[in-house]
């Protein structure tokens, strides 16, 4: 299927639904765990699982935010433009990742900058 704004909107809406379902299932895992709190031997495993769960949830929430922002950009007509330099983002790049915010050049520049500041 060739790239179009309609295609992108469809992809983003599907991605959003998927992420929301993922968040819901992550939430329900937390609720299920409450019933098992008195198994002391499992505490370490449980704590580990919760940490992984929280990290995963943050990642899903962050991606969901990206998807929402991309949908806003579709509505206001700035979709497909790099947020940093305003250049038109490669279609192939948008097809691979419809909620991408930066062109390849700015992304790699940011990743390099991030690598220096990340602890
Ligand atoms: Zn750029």
Image (tube, rainbow, N blue to C red):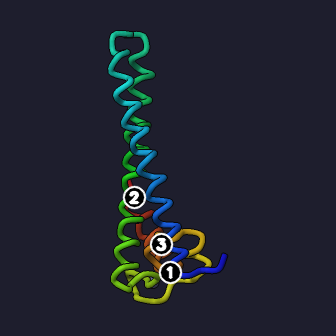
Q: How far apart are labels 1 and 2 at the CA level?
A: 19 Å
Q: Residue at x 38, y 82 (%)?
A: 84
**Do the residues under discs 1 and 3 have CB atoms within 8 angstroms?**
yes
Q: Earlier in the sequence, mark 1 or mark 2?
A: 1
Q: Which residue is mark 3?
A: 9
Residue placed most toward the observer, 118 or 108: 108
Element on which disc 2 rests: helix
Camera-side residue of 117 and 69: 69
Residue displayed at 38% across by 80% down:
83
For marks 1 and 2, give the one nearer the viewer.
Answer: 1
Counting every numbered tag in the picture gives 3
Secondary element at image label 3? helix
Ligand 1 shown in quarter? bottom left
Residue under the image location 48 percent in, 52 percent down = 18
The percent coordinates of residue 108 (x first, y second) are: 51, 74
Q: CA distance from mark 1 to mark 3?
A: 6 Å
> Residue at label 2?
64
Q: Residue at x 40, y 87 (%)?
A: 85
Which dot, 3 or 2, sits closer to the camera? 3
**How far is the residue under mark 3 from the one under mark 2?**
14 Å
Lower position in the chain sequence, tag 3 or tag 2: 3
Which residue matches tag 1?
5
Toward the right, the furthest residue is: 1
Percent x, y of residue 27: 36, 37
Q: What percent of the width, then of the height, locates residue 64?
A: 39, 58
Q: Are marks 1 and 2 in contact (CB under 8 Å)?
A: no
Q: Mark 2 packing: few (<14 Cα in 10 Å), some, or many (20+)?
A: many
Residue nearest the viewer, comparing 75 with 30: 75
- The image position of residue 17, as x and y in percent, is 45, 55
**In screen coordinates, is 115 left or right of 65?**
right
């Amino acid at each position: 299927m060739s790239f179009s704004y309609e295609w992108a909107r469809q992809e983003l809406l599907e991605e959003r639904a998927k992420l929301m379902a993922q968040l819901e299932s992550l939430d329900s895992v937390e609720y299920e765990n409450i019933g098992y709190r008195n198994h002391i031997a499992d505490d370490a495993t449980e704590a580990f699982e919760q940490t992984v769960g929280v990290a995963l949830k943050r990642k899903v929430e962050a991606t969901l935010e990206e998807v929402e922002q991309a949908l806003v950009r579709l509505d206001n007509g700035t979709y497909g433009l790099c947020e940093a330099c305003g250049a038109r983002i490669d279609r192939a790049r948008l097809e691979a990742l419809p909620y991408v915010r930066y062109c390849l050049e700015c992304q790699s520049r940011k990743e390099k900058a991030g690598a220096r500041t990340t602890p």
